[in-house]
Amino acid sequence: MPDETAPVFTLRQTRAFTTRECLMLLSLWRRLRWPQGAGFAYSAARYLFYGFAGFLAFSILLAASRLADSWPSLTARLIFAALGFLACYVFAAWQQSRHAGNYYFESYKPGNLIRLDAYGLHESGDPPSVRYLWPAITTIHSTKSWLVVLMANNGALLLAKEAFDGQDVEAFCAELTHRWHAGCAAAKDSVA
């Protein structure tokens, strides 16, 4: 049973995360979530995609060079289509990497409150509040600059510690880790 008399620890976000902080947190989250990489199927599909794209580009160039004398307009259309596809692909990949996680990090605004209570971690702000119960948390990773709390459902609480100026973030992280271990032990005892 959780200790109802334990003090409530809180952090209030004082500023928005910078783009650099968002990218670093996403990178850290990926490394923690998939420590061995993305897996064989994803890697194979990625290499096959680029292999077939290269083969298609080579085939288009070969066809265009053979058709250049007999059908110059078809040659121009093939080359234009290939270059258009390449430009669109590069632009989309650039936009995706540039805006990766923006939908997630836009919810971290100054004034948001992160609180520890007897049952778990409670995040409140805009959008509405979210509660993470102790058994749902799988990993807590705290460094000098970052706090990453991984959930069983692939979710995460990602925080840049510098966005909580003037507060004892290290004490909060230590208490979070302590209560998480105690909460998980209590959950195992109640099941046994």
Image: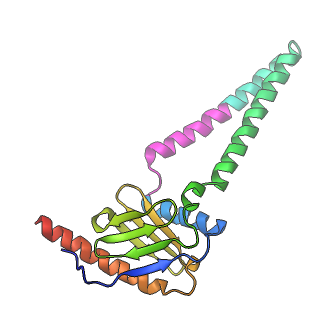
Judged left or right of residue 148, residue 54 is right
Rendered location of residue 1, percent (x, y): 18, 74
What residue do we see at 62% from left, 39% from top? 50
Which coloring applies here? rainbow
What residue do we see at 30% from left, 78% from top? 179
Judged left or right of residue 103, residue 186 is left
What residue do we see at 56% from left, 61% from top? 105
In the image, residue 3 above or below residue 65: below
What residue do we see at 58% from left, 60% from top? 106
Along the viewing direction, whichever of 102 and 31 lies nearer the viewer: 102
Type of secondary structure dominating the magenta stretch:
helix
In the image, residue 65 above or below residue 1: above
Rendered location of residue 188, percent (x, y): 17, 68
Within the magenta stretch, is there residue 121? no
First to last magenta residue range: 34-55
Within the magenta stretch, is there residue 50? yes
The answer to whether residue 18 is visible is: yes
Rendered location of residue 173, percent (x, y): 42, 80
Judged left or right of residue 81, residue 115 is left
Q: Name, please, the residue furthest toward the left.
A: 192
In the image, residue 18 above or below residue 174: above
Image quarter where the C terminus lies is: bottom left
The answer to whether residue 35 is visible is: no
